Each structure stands twice: as C-alpha cells, then as structure tokens.
Image (cartoon, rainbow, N blue to C red):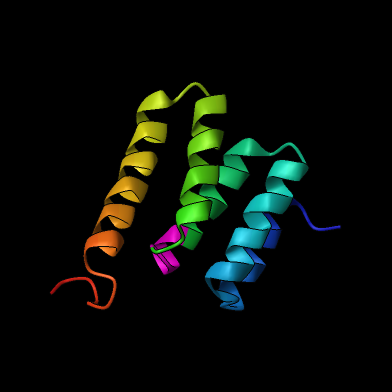
Amino acid sequence: MLPRRKIIAVASAADIGAAGVSGLAHLSAHAGDMPGAIQAASRALELDPSQKQLRRWLAGLYQSRDRPDLAREQLAIVERMESWSSQNPLDPPGR
C-alpha cells in the first residue's frame, strides 16, 4: 500500500479530475487522515468549484478541526451559489 502522500501525487499526475480527487478526500477521512482529506477536498474544489455538497462536507471537516472561520467561509460560498441559482436558473455565472 502506498503512503497517503504517494496516493495524492499519483492521482494528481494521472489527472483523475475533481470527482477522483474528491474520492481521495473521502478515503483519507475514512482512514483518519483529516489534514489529507482537507487537502484533497480543497484540490477538488480548485478543479470544480461548483461542488456544493463537497463544500458542505469540507466545512464539517474544518469545524471538526476547530477551524470555524474556514467552515463559515465554505458555507457562505454555498449560500451565495444557492442564492444565485435561485435568482438566475438559466443564466451562467458571470452574466
């Protein structure tokens, strides 16, 4: 079995995309590696910032790591995304 750092490096090199990196985040959390889970979830959001469910999950990780400021930041982004989508259901962002 590869160490966690190797798994993330191999996955990034293989360009598995946001869904794959998100999966790595969940696997890291399941293995008890919360810093690795946060790192992978953050990377997945860099690749696909529209993942509201992942943002909520990441907020929970931040809260469990005693980082309520970062948790609130993620939840505020989700709130803005939901507000935007309810006001402009057919317009893409940036319009």
Of residue 40 and residue 71, the one placed in the foreground of this image is 71
Q: Residue at x 43, y 67 (%)?
A: 48
The count of marks equals: 0
Residue at (33, 38) in percent of width and height: 73
- Residue most extreme to the right: 1
Image point (66%, 58%), residue name? 24
The quarter in which the N terminus is drawn is: bottom right
Above/below status of 66 relative to 25:
above
**Residue 3 drawn at (x, y percent):** 76, 52
Q: Residue at x 45, y 55 (%)?
A: 52
Pick the front one: 77 or 19 = 77
Res 49 quadrant in image: bottom left
Q: Is residue 46 left or right of residue 56?
A: left
Magenta residues, start to end: 45-49
**Is residue 24 found left or right of 70 in the rendered image?**
right
Residue 57 occupies quadrant: top right
Q: Tell me residue 13's x, y (percent).
A: 58, 74
Residue 28 location, x and y as percent?
70, 47
Q: Position of residue 6 (x, y in %)?
A: 69, 59
Main secondary structure type of the part rendered in magenta: helix
Q: Residue furthest left?
A: 95
